Each structure stands twice: as C-alpha cells, then as structure tokens.
Image: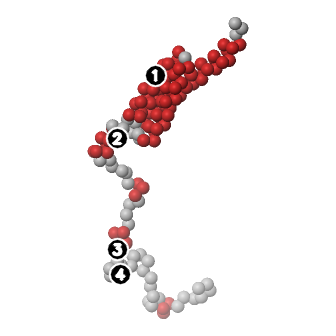
Amino acid sequence: MMGEERDPSRDGDFRADLTRRPAPAPGELDYASTVTAPTEWVPYVYTDSELRAQAGRRGLSIASLVFGLLGLLIAVFGVWGAALSLAAVVLSVMARLTERRAGTVWAYGLLTGLAGLVLAVGWVLIVTQVLTIVPG
C-alpha cells in the first residue's frame, strides 16, 4: 500500500461498512441480547428468613462483650481477669468470622478483652518485678 496510487475506478467494487455490526446468521442470537451485567457488581439481596437468622446470630458477639467486661473489671483488682479476657478475645475473633452483622458488638468485646489482658500483664509485671525488689 505504501507508495501505491489509488485507482478511482475501483472505488465501487468493495466497500467495508464499519458503522454497523453484521446481521446475525440464521439461528444465532443477536449480539446485544448476549451482553449481560457483570455479576460482581450486582448486590446480594437477603431474604426475610436470612435476615431473621442473621439477627439471631449475635450470641458469640454478646458473649465476647460480657466476658470482656467481666475480665476488665476483675483485672482492675488483680490478675484473675486474664482468663476471662482471653476468652473474650477468642470469642470475638470467632464472632468476626461468623457474625457479619454484629460488628460493633464483637469489636467492643475484642477491645475490652485486650484491655483486660493488658491490665493482667501489668499486674504480673508489678508482682514479679516491683514486689521482689522491696526488701522485706
């Protein structure tokens, strides 16, 4: 094509129509009918029974919050709240994986559990480091 001259007498022989798609062959579907929306953008709609089932799935989250608060309260006075605080952390991690709609409850359970563990570790450090130095 480079360097060749165009022959004006052959312009009517072949003309590609690039403005329209070709008509489908007999038995084929039209292209526009085969185009669908991407499924990753379609939101999932919960049924009423799924919503009721998920509303009842807050047991682990509530248990983690209760254990976290009890562990934190007991850890203020001594190291004995460590077990309850550890249970709160474990329950909140389990609730995070299973109870999607109870996010705030298990997050507070995790925070109170971690705070109780920090206080319990503080009590252990005070007892082992400070009280052993004091001559008696």
Q: Earlier in the sequence, mark 2 or mark 1?
A: 2
Location of mark 4 (residue): 25
Q: Earlier in the sequence, mark 1 or mark 3?
A: 3
Q: Confirm whether residue 87 shows in the render.
A: yes
Camera-near label (1 vs 4) is: 1
Disc 2 secondary structure class: helix
Amino acid found under the numbered disc labelled 4: Ala
Q: Earlier in the sequence, mark 4 or mark 2?
A: 4
Q: CA distance from mark 4 to mark 3?
A: 9 Å
Residue 129: where, in percent of width, then height? 68, 17
Q: CA distance from mark 2 to mark 1?
A: 26 Å
The answer to whether the residues at label 3 and label 2 have Cβ atoms under 8 Å apart is no
Camera-near label (2 vs 1) is: 1
Whether 81 is drawn above or below 94: the answer is above
Amino acid found under the numbered disc labelled 3: Asp
Residue 50: where, in percent of width, then height? 31, 45
Disc 1 secondary structure class: helix
Location of mark 1 (residue): 70
The answer to whether the residues at label 1 and label 3 have Cβ atoms under 8 Å apart is no
Amino acid found under the numbered disc labelled 1: Leu
Amino acid found under the numbered disc labelled 2: Gln
The residue depicted at 52 percent of the width and 26 percent of the height is 83
The answer to whether the residues at label 4 and label 2 have Cβ atoms under 8 Å apart is no
